Image (tube, rainbow, N blue to C red):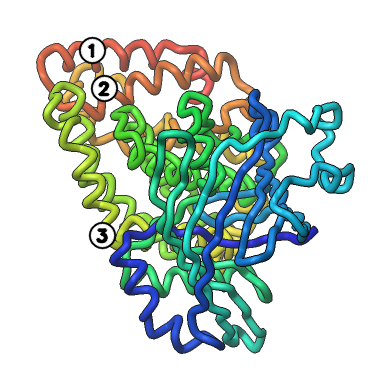
Amino acid sequence: MVKETEIKLRVSRATLAALREHPLLKARSESGWQRHELFNQYYDTPARDLARARVALRLRRDGGQYIQTLKSRGQSVAGLSERNEWDWYLDQPSLDPARLDDQCWPAELAGLDKTLLQPIFSTDFVREKADLVWQRDEQRIAVEAALDLGRVVAGPCAEEICELELELREGEPAALLELALALAADLPLMPCDISKAERGYRLFDPASYALALPAPAPGAEMPLDEALALLAWHLLGSSQRLAEQYRFSGHWKLLEQWLAQLIDLRALLGSLGQAAPRASSSGLRGALDALIEDWRPQLLAGQDDESVRQAAPARFAAELEQTRWGLFSLEASHWLLSRAWTARRSATGQRQGAAPLGRWLAHLLADEAHALPLARYRLQPEGLTEQLPRLERMLVWLRLARGVLEMPEPDRLYGELAKLGELAARPLDDDLRERRAAQAQTVATLKPWKALLK
């Protein structure tokens, strides 16, 4: 068994060709590109027991060699993944279930009848790979770069494979992100933690495809720094999966959810005070502001305009042909992996970063509530839009971490405040004016709101 650490980047055919000739890859390559044709058959039971256990079983033909591989899902966020992998070299092109013993086989599948395993889908592609070597902080870094072009096939359905994989062989994972960032400055690279196997399952049965990442569960005693990392990784990873799934299906709801992750991430970064000095996140906040500024009006317009919804997939495809989405995603991943917000912060910032989340969050929400004059907006609801950033800062924490609060009815506070935030984001008309005023009154009378103002 080995631990595989890699980053997967979706690209276009033009970008794939440009990567082949990219000077940075050429300068670090030890032997140039080596071409391999890889034929891969994935196996599961008719009930897809392996998929539910988050493992993938593959039989690969590489030239005259047959390799049986079992991979765990592991951790995979924003294109950067770590997972366990077991390989067995076989003499013939048939699965050997006897190799799937207790050392690698998930305990939850211990009672599975392995004779039920059958071919589900295939991923056949041409791989051009090169071994890259360079020095980083006096440490040797070794990475295998792979350019993959081919198809995922499940019955009558097929999807193109066109991607760059960077697999770490030696050194720190941050080196992968730094290399990807350098390439993304010139070329549109889309970090994508949806594996070839997941894409095969998606083709085989779209209704069974699991899009959502496991919900984060911060604890009241968790330090703020740890909670920030947990929640930000979740939002970033969710935005990546939603972007990929919207690119694949074009379902409007996915685009709405994608934007919601970006708004939450922007609000999270803006809520941290001295625990994350503004200078440490200025680049990320600027990139998020630009994305939200471009896409929020489109999403609002699309609520009532079918033509906007119909035009959105082409507009999103054009977004992915630019560099900014991939560059932002990689920069955010690097920021989180390196914990850049902890560098050069004040002693007060250090104390805040180490503070228990439950205590810190209670203070944050109280401060934000005192700064939100709901009585004014009952009389002047047109001014509520100016408070949207504050509402979003409160909402992201209530959405993801309200369980740590010792206060009455936190769920109701979140629900009613979310309604107020939705009204604040929409263009004002006479009906909305009345609804804003009424909702401001509703929030102001809540027990948990009054508790925040004590």
**Residue wearing tag 2:** 423
Q: CA distance from mark 1 to mark 2?
A: 8 Å
Q: Closer to the camera, 257 or 347? A: 257
Residue placed at 80% from the left, 38% from the top?
Answer: 106
Establish if 86 lies above or below 169: above
> Which residue type carries mark 1?
Arg
Q: Identify the mark nearer the N-term, 3 or 2.
A: 3
**Residue wearing tag 3:** 322
Q: CA distance from mark 3 to mark 2?
A: 32 Å
Q: Closer to the camera, 293 or 73? A: 73
Where is residue 67 drawn, in percent x and y?
70, 58
**Residue wearing tag 1:** 435
> Mark 2 Cα within 10 Å, few/some/many (few <14, many 20+)?
many
Establish if 70 lies above or below 167: above
Establish if 414 lies above or below 431: below
Residue 328 seen in the figure: no
Looking at the rendered structure, the secondary structure element under dot 1 is helix
Q: Is residue 181 left or right of residue 359?
A: left
* Marks 1, 3: nearer the viewer: 3
